[in-house]
Amino acid sequence: MVDRKVNEARVGWRLWAGLAAIVGGHLAGRLELPGILVVISTASTSLALAAMVDLGLTGRRRSAVLLGVMGALAVVSGQGYLQVALLGWAPLLLLFILDERLRARPVWREYAVGLGLALLLAGIFLVPTVRFLPEFGKDGDALFGAAQPLEYIPLNLVIRDIDFMKSEILGKLGFPHLYNLYVGWVPIALGALGLLLARRTDWRPLAFIIVGSLVSILLASALPFRWLVQHIPALALIRHTPLMAGLAVPGVLAVAAYGLDRTLALSFPQLSLRFRQAEGERAVSLNTAWLIAIPLVLGLRTSFLHGRSWVQTSNVQNIQAVATRWSTPSLEWVQPPWGEHGWVEVGMEQSLKLSSVWFPWRWEGREVPAPRIEATRGGILEAGTYQWSADGVDTYLHENRHYASIQSSGEVVACTATGAAGDITVRCPDGPGGQLIVEENSWNGWRAWVDGERVELLEGDRLRVSAPAGAHEFRFRYLPWDVPVGLLITISGVILGLWLWAKDETPRAGVAQSVP
């Protein structure tokens, strides 16, 4: 009966810790931008941390498989900031791998299995990324001006004043999504109790979590990057380092959950109330440990209300109505008002080919395709012909810009195009020969056919082929070698993971003691 009550209590505090993570500012606060990818990345890397600890505590092969799966999810999610923060935790795995005499424990093999499996499962993403990496471009900041001073970052765990978050006080910018970490004072207090009541046998996982959280905060301050960028200039691309502090929050909550468990393990006095009734005296007893639930619930409520400030809905019917009028008969490019994120999702729903919208990365040395339809707010486009206005958005048409056209001796013959992604069909009317130019970036892996016969692509940044006189049908397909190779690697990782999962999961010797 005692063990059952203990297990029920542990389920309760684990549930509380999970809820605290869900409503924490390190997730909800990112939606101020909104940074959906950062939310996904934070969740994925947090699960990878949990898998790291689980493997260190159990040493089981199945835990290594879980680490591989969670590690692969962490690799393919987000924009890279949380992945860099996760790498900052990696050296701390030595706490589980080495014993007191600094000798390797058998669990190091399981960590190697987990890492290898993660790379295999993420192969379909990693292989094309590595191949294309030299072509990537991104704005950098060698001064790391967005970074907040180290001593101020922990304050974000307990600050929930929105006006303060939008100010530039305490060395930050006025963008809450970069710095919001709010979880409240309850986890901080429970974490302090956990350190006071910690058992000596739990020092390895506690040290991993606490030091790892401090490493994330240190990276968020950009102190290591300011020193390293002098030797590795490419590190200037990691300009929004405050996002890395989000990986410290799971650590704070993990220590808080441990502190709650150790607190509930203490002996609490019983509160007894006696009532006199006609048939005799009646007593009701209550364990005062239940009083701890009051600050836990209130803390969750405060975090929830704070997080709700960043989650809201908006009416996009006006945007949809404008985007619908941008529909084109072919695959012409459309440019919405620059810098407005709301048009991206709506434009994709309308099957528009959007040009020159905001992305964190770009193709270095390549110009974005010139749009045929271009929209702006308040500005006058001299190069385009004004068409109409709606909801403050002015729409212009560039009549001389075509998605696909045959050009020869100054004559331009417009063609129609259908398709999507890497499969494009172009139909051109009867006309003189020349060069067919399609406003798509040309790259290794593109192939072309004219009336079903394979032809060679001409050199240039855009898709180009020689076009014979007359009416013809052209087809372009993107068939790079890296995608099937990456897919094959991922499939091999899935097969290997299933095979490893089916093997005996008997705990290995020489692993760290587990936390209840």
Image (tube, rainbow, N blue to C red):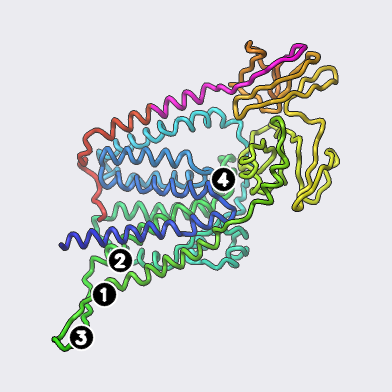
Give me the residue at 23% from left, 55% from top. 201
Is 490 included in the stretch rendered in magenta?
A: yes
Q: Are discs 3 and 4 less than 8 Å apart at CB?
A: no
Relative height, residue 497 to residue 247 (above, below) = above
Give me the residue at 73% from left, 42% from top. 325
Q: How far is the residue under mark 2 from the one under mark 3?
A: 39 Å
Task: Indicate which label's residue lies in the foreground, 2 or 1.
Answer: 1
Say which amino acid is labelled 2.
Leu
Q: Earlier in the sequence, mark 3 or mark 4?
A: 4
Judging by the rendered image, the residue that carries numbered circle 3 is: 275
Relative image position of residue 243 (x, y in whole percent): 52, 52
Judging by the rendered image, the residue that carries numbered circle 4 is: 238
Is 479 included in the stretch rendered in magenta?
A: yes
Relative image position of residue 387 (x, y in whole percent): 82, 42
Q: Earlier in the sequence, mark 2 or mark 4?
A: 2
Judging by the rendered image, the residue that carries numbered circle 2 is: 196
Give the left or right position of residue 14, taking residue 465 as reference. left
Please give the range of residues in magenta: 466-491
Relative image position of residue 107 (x, y in whole percent): 27, 40
Q: Which of these two is toward me, 134 or 49?
A: 49
Q: How far is the residue under mark 3 from the one under mark 4?
A: 67 Å
Judging by the rendered image, the residue that carries numbered circle 1 is: 288
Q: Is residue 151 visible?
A: no
Relative height, residue 477 to residue 351 (above, below) = above
Say which amino acid is labelled 3.
Phe
Question: Alpha-carbon neighbours of circle 2 within 10 Å: few (<14), some, or many (≥20)?
Answer: few
Quick one: SS at disc 3? Answer: strand
Relative height, residue 176 to residue 225 (above, below) = below
Quick one: SS at disc 2? Answer: helix
